[in-house]
Amino acid sequence: MYQNKITLTPQEILEKDFKIDTRGYRLKEVDQFLDTIISDYEQFFAIIDSLEKEKAELLREIMTLKQDLRNAKMNAEIVKNTDTTEISNLDILRRLSQLEKDVYGRREDD
């Protein structure tokens, strides 16, 4: 994603050749500096990749939690609209058991 906005790759920096002038820079210093830049670029790419993977995992978790919330709201609405005389302790225990399976069962899969 961000790599499309970055102009240079570590390999391009490594392969860059500069023309030597009589009053130019010391090649050893330039090479050392470029090596540092290459190392930084590699770290940046690794960090970006790691953050992209973390973002994808968090988005998946958000979607799961949103679905769980929708299910819980739907169950609450069903209970709210149901006549209280029809609800027994057994019905409540069944619904609670199903909700626990939905919530905790998915976490075991992750």
Image (tube, grey):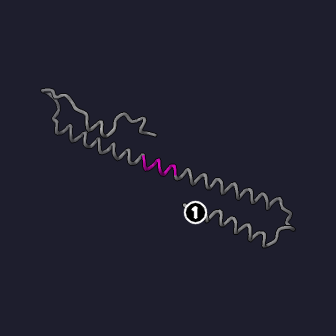
Q: In screen coordinates, is 68 left or right of 11?
A: right
Q: In screen coordinates, is 82 left or right of 66?
A: right
Whole-percent x and y of residue 23? 14, 27
Residue beneath the point at 15% across and 26% down: 21
Residue 67, how many percent across, how many down?
Answer: 65, 54
Pinpoint residue 90: horizontal percent, then vertical percent. Answer: 78, 73
Amino acid found under the numbered disc labelled 1: Arg
| Residue located 83% across and 59% down the image | 81
* Furthest residue toward left: 22
At 74% from the left edge and 71% from the top edge, which residue is drawn? 93
The C terminus: image quadrant: bottom right
Residue 20 position (above or below residue 76): above
The reply, left or right, for residue 1 in relation to residue 60 is left
Give left or right: position of 51 versus 85.
left
Q: Give the range drawn in magenta.
A: 49-56
- Majority secondary structure in the magenta region: helix
**Residue position for label 1:** 107
Please say if 52 is above or below 13: below
